[in-house]
Amino acid sequence: MNLCKVLGTVVASEKHPAFHARKLLVVQPLDEKQAPMGKSFLAVDHTSGAGKGDVVLVLREGTGVRQILQDKTLPIRSLVVGVVDKVQLGPA
């Protein structure tokens, strides 16, 4: 799983049928201190309702994504699986 920040949404009038009625988000990977790291990428929002500025958990493994969505044929590699309320480092 990756910690990411939602940078915005993607709107496409033509897309693969697997993406029909699914929200596409541009996400930026974050390190443990929530600083940007690496390149942004696209992720499908599963059911979290995430929006611009939200910190989210992204699953970036196709087999796991297909298991969650219960469809072995989907060409989806990155899936937002949750919105992060808080990140705490060190002792609780």
Image (spheres, helix red, strand yellow):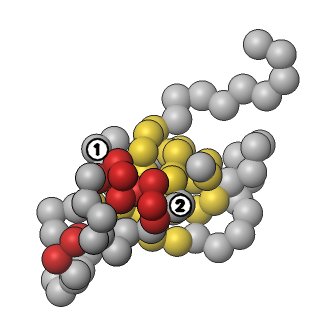
Disc ID at residue 47: 1
x, y percent for residue 84 = 52, 35
35 w.r.t. 82: above or below = below
Residue at the far top in the pictured view: 92
Residue sitting farthest toward the front: 72
Q: Which residue is mark 2?
A: 60
Would residue 44 appear left or right of 26 to someone viewing this image?
left
Is 36 located above or below residue 81 in the figure? Answer: below
Q: Residues within 10 Å of mark 1 (few under 14, many from 20)?
A: few
Front position in the image: 32 or 77: 77
| Closest to the observer, 2 or 52 | 2
The residue lying at 34 percent from left, 42 percent from top is 48
| Quadrant in the rendering for residue 22 | bottom left
Q: Secondary structure at mark 2?
A: loop
The number of callouts visible is 2
Residue 35 x, y percent position in the rendering: 74, 53
Q: Residue at x 58, y 70 (%)?
A: 40
Within the image, what quadrant is residue 81 found in?
top left
Quick one: SS at disc 1?
Answer: loop
Quadrant where the C terminus sits is: top right
Image position of 57 with respect to 40: above or below: above
> Which of the two residues, 85 or 72, is positioned nearer the viewer here?
72
Q: Is residue 2 left or right of residue 69?
A: right
Report the amino acid beneath label 2: Arg
At label 1, the amino acid type is Thr
- Residue 23 image-quadrant placement: bottom left
Tell me what residue is drawn at x 16 percent, y 69 percent. 20
Q: Which mark is residue 6?
A: none
Left or right: where 10 falls relative to 6? left
